[in-house]
Image (cartoon, rainbow, N blue to C red):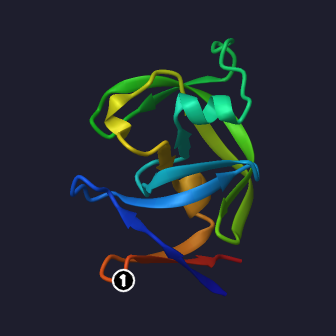
């Protein structure tokens, strides 16, 4: 069935919608809902909290293009679990940003399509809710 998730607006009047996400059942992050991002993108800090080795970046390095057109390098990983409230997706493709990118602001990354594509997604900014309905 469809699950209702509370969303938060970015405090600076940005258009971004922020959701609290639990990664690998241990690290909580606030991610911006981004249907334009092909995968989940996480900050370096989130990567370190997940225990991911960011020293050898040549291994699994991918180039990522940010919304403003800048390019940055990331490390491709698979998250065992990405959970919003009790909605969970396992084995989600993600990337850890290797630079501290200032444009992310208060959040720790983007909730991209490697998670969102598993759902029929509706957002309602009036009620500040997002509905996730798992696609079978």
Against 63, residue 29 (above or below) is below
**Quadrant occupied by the N terminus:** bottom right
Q: Is residue 79 left or right of residue 10?
A: right
- Relative depth, front residue between 92 and 5: 5
Disc tally is 1
Q: Is residue 17 left or right of residue 93?
A: left
**Quadrant occupied by the C terminus:** bottom right
**Residue 76 visible in the snapshot:** no
x then y, percent, for residue 15? 26, 59
Against 35, residue 126 (above or below) is below
x then y, percent, for residue 46? 59, 36
x then y, percent, for residue 126? 30, 82
The quarter of the displayed image where residue 10 is located: bottom left
Residue at image mark 1 = 127
Q: Residue at x 68, y 61 (%)?
A: 83
Q: Residue at x 59, y 71 (%)?
A: 119
Against 27, residue 96 (above or below) is above
x then y, percent, for residue 100? 44, 24
Q: Residue at x 28, y 56 (%)?
A: 11
Q: Residue at x 60, y 53 (%)?
A: 114
SS category of the residue bearing label 1: loop
Q: Is residue 65 left or right of residue 89?
A: left
Q: Residues within 10 Å of mark 1 (few under 14, many from 20)?
A: few
**Residue 59 visible in the snapshot:** yes
Q: Residue lying farthest bottom?
A: 1
- Relative depth, front residue between 11 and 96: 11
- Relative depth, front residue between 7 and 78: 7
């Amino acid at each position: 069935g469809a699950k209702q998730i509370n969303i938060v607006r970015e405090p600076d009047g940005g258009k971004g919608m922020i959701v609290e996400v639990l990664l690998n059942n241990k690290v909580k992050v606030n991610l911006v809902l981004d249907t334009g991002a092909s995968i989940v993108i996480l900050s370096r800090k989130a990567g370190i909290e997940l225990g991911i080795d960011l020293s050898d970046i040549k291994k699994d390095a991918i180039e990522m293009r940010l919304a403003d057109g800048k390019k940055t390098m990331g490390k491709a990983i698979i998250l065992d679990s990405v959970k919003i409230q009790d909605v969970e997706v396992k084995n989600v493709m993600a990337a850890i940003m290797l630079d501290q990118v200032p444009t992310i602001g208060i959040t720790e990354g983007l909730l991209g399509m490697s998670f969102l594509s598993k759902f029929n997604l509706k957002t309602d900014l009036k009620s500040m809710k997002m509905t996730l309905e798992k696609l079978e």
